[in-house]
Amino acid sequence: MNRHLEQEGDNLKRLAVLTSGGDAPGMNAATRAVVRSGIGHGFEVFGVQHGYTGLIKGDFRPLGARDVGGIIHLGGTMLGTTRCEELRTERGCANALGQLRAHQISVLVVIGGNGSQTGARELQQRGAAVVGVASTIDNDLYGTEVTIGTTTAIDVALEAIDRLRVTAASLKRAFLVEVMGRLSGHIALTAGIAGGAECIVIPEVETTPEAVARQLRDAYARGKSHAIAVVAEGAKYNAEALARHFHEHGERIGFDLRVTRLGHIQRGGTPGVYDRMLGTRLGAAAADAAAEGRSGIVLGIRAGKVASTALEEVAGKQKAADVSLLELARVLAM
Ligand code: F6P
């Protein structure tokens, strides 16, 4: 965990930072903190444009304190990001390592989620020094209770659910609201419970269209003026599949039904205070770790404190959502 790329004949301390995978609100706060804390520790800091794709191409730019000014309040990522298939190949990895050596980078900070930290592990295993920062709206990264971006993304979903409930109640309708989460039901569970949903469908727990129809029908029978089902996109039956099934099988749900897919609207929001602080704390901690010669780790939060987990443990794993919340949602939907 303490390996830093060997450099011959000089004492250059150069740190590079990149963002990777899906953008998440708070990534900019993290980038800013890495740069400014890194400078504070005496590093010369470089930004890598467009994630691992930029790393493989050698798309580096020096970053000073002023270059990361005016970004803490912005969603997205000033560095750009990609989902980079090339890093999954030996050749891609070799090129990335070659660029780190050519630019005399002693430590690389990777701000991203599951795929990004798996890439970070590959580079670390091949001799680079990498520090990960936990960032994905899905909040499904192992080793941290919360990731950068998830709180803001859930707030965006929640605002949409609140609005849909108002129109649903006015017209006595049911809505299937699809939220993000390919493998994780964290967004659906949290936005669903906080939004008072009548039904929540997540990838971790298989359900049937008949069971969803029953929950909506029961809400109608209990005299509700509306019913909201929050469905994670990665569930076996997503919102479209459920609506199609109801239609094809003449499944009665009582209410008139509408479908809303929130999609990428959940990603680009203005980071709230929690994500700005989280990005700032984890970014600064990444620069601290780099200065102390610690690498091969991902920084996240446990029990409210910054905590590090070995990249080896994080890579390729999936943090499960708290499925016990489904029962809470069921009880409260009465
Ligand atoms: O970054 C995570 C995420 O937003 C998932 O919730 C979603 O399934 C996926 O990214 C969408 O990916 P893309 O932006 O590549 O379509």
Image (tube, rainbow, N blue to C red):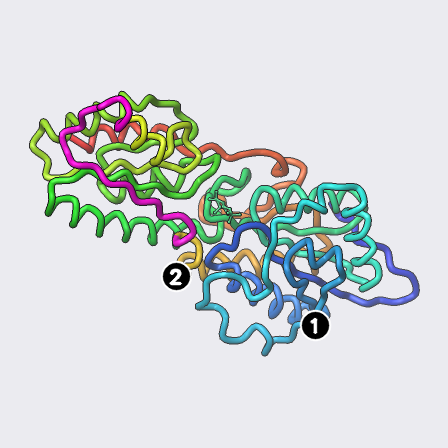
Q: Secondary structure at mark 1?
A: strand
Say which quarter of the image contains residue 211: top left
Residue sitting nearer the eye, 286 or 114? 114
- For the point 47% across and 32% down, which residue is it? 320
Ligand 1 near label 2 (Cβ, under 8 Å)?
no
Whether the magenta-drawn stretch holds residue 211 is answered as: no
Which labelled disc corresponds to residue 200? Answer: none
Marks 2/1: CA–CA distance: 28 Å
Q: Earlier in the sequence, mark 2 or mark 1?
A: 1
For disc 2, the marked residue is: 273
For disc 1, the marked residue is: 62
Q: Are marks 2 and 1 in contact (CB under 8 Å)?
A: no
Depth check, mark 2 against mark 1: the one in front is 1
Instruction: Tell me the magenta residue range.
Output: 246-265
Q: Secondary structure at mark 2?
A: helix
Whether the magenta-drawn stretch holds residue 257 is answered as: yes
- For the point 44% across and 68% down, which residue is it? 73
Horizontal relation, residue 74 to residue 289: left or right: left
The type of residue carrying mark 2 is Val
The quarter in which the N terminus is drawn is top right
Q: 25 above or below 116? A: below
